[in-house]
Image (spheres, grey):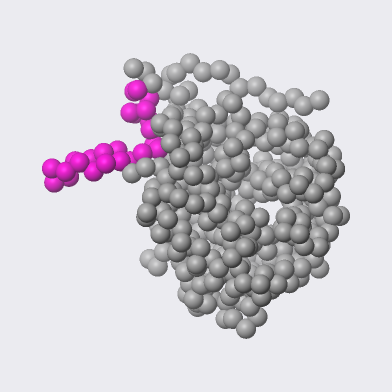
Amino acid sequence: MKNLLLVLCFNLCLFKSITAQNKIIKPVSDRALWLSYMDKIARPVLSNLAEDKLKEKMPVVLSKRIDNPEHRAKVAYLEAFARTLSGIAPWLNTEGGSKEEVDLRNQYRQWSLKAIANAVDSSAKDYMLWKGGQPLVDASYVAFALVRCPWLWQHLDAGVQQKVVAVLKITRSTVPVYTNWILFSGMIEAFFCKYGLDYDPVRLEYSIREFANHWYVGDGVFSDGMDYHWDYYNSIVIHPNLATILDVVKQKTRSYDWFIPRLDTINKRYAIIQERLINTDGSYPVTGRSIVYRGGVFHHLADISLRKKLPKALHPAQVRCALTAVIKKTLESPSTFTKDGWLNIGLYGSQPDLADFYITTGSLYICTNIFVALGLPDTDEFWSAPAEPWTAVKVWSGQDFPADHALDLH
């Protein structure tokens, strides 16, 4: 009875049934809810880029504290495109689902193929800026998307593939900042490695070994370079990128076999921490930079679910419900979107003062990375298991619960 009351009182995973005009409206499934929000965010970006109209249609709002307005404005389009594509890529790579989902996926596949072609075509109006510091970051998200979605790479025309390779190679002239940025260079090389292209093993080595040998600070988290910051970059970048790069290179070499099980243990611990950060209403601590990335700060929890590597302490259904609560909380405010459907800067609606000096409209689309678990089929336990309360719901409703303990690696 107690568990039933928990679900009834605190379940934010499903819309409640309501009675209207003597008709019962059935609850919307979590997957349908995720797809609806994903579509709302991604549609303006990819549909316009597919028509070579992204620069024409997308408004570019800059942080009040922007450091380089001219450059940031130019790269905002690559940010929006690359980050959106990275978040929806696992879903694009799946098959099946309801007729509505299949139709939606087919539409997005066609938009994505055309969007990529325009982004790398120097004669297109929407040809992106690929050279420079921020372009390195977002070129890596294009690479990440193509690693996550072989379907896209395989269905690009040979000529477009060559142009993709060419623009990604442009980024090699940029030396990454000595922080999580080394993973951006590493991800681009991982893309080359995955598809049998010439890759730089030194950039891969550098991106893996700095974190493996020098930057792990304990209890599931890494420092972001030489210094540790209490923000969400372990989730936004570090854990998902490291895990994906290792998944790629382990197919080519056994040089990192010593680190793979260690990272798996670290990843599992950080997933537990992330799940416990999600409050009963889907809110979470507002700390650290890039907080306007909204649900993107739970990239790791979604990604480890996608890779089916969740720790035993976390049931897929409770993670699904927790992430659903985050999605709803961060996107429910009426001021989240402009009247034309573009994201506003903010965490809960329009909050421009939350923007760091590098934030533009394009930056915000990294929030799509919370949707990567849509890459699991609808028959997977993550989606099919009954709704289950997550840690905060259990604890703050008075349910007895095991204490948390730090991870000590030796």
The residue lying at 72 percent from left, 68 percent from top is: 165
The residue sitting at the bottom extreme is 123
**Left or right: where does residue 207 sit relative to residue 164?**
right
Residue 349 lies in quadrant: bottom left
Region in magenta:
4-27
**Left or right: where does residue 86 sit relative to residue 130?**
left
Number of numbered discs present? 0
Q: Position of residue 235 (x, y in %)?
A: 63, 44
Is 9 inside the magenta-drawn segment? yes
Q: Position of residue 119 (x, y in %)?
A: 61, 73
**Left or right: where does residue 196 sit relative to residue 51?**
right
Tell me if residue 354 can be seen: no
Tell me if residue 306 can be seen: yes
Quadrant in the picture for the C terminus: top right
- Front one among 354 and 283: 283
The residue lying at 59 percent from left, 26 percent from top is: 312
Q: Where is residue 3 in the image (x, y as percent from the top left)?
A: 38, 21
Q: Is 340 drawn above or below residue 297 in the view shown?
A: below
Is 396 inside the magenta-drawn segment? no
**Left or right: where does residue 83 sit relative to residue 262?**
left
- Front one among 104 and 72: 104
Quadrant in the picture for the N terminus: top left
Q: Position of residue 111 (x, y in %)?
A: 50, 68
The residue lying at 84 percent from left, 39 percent from top is: 213
The residue lying at 34 percent from left, 28 percent from top is: 9
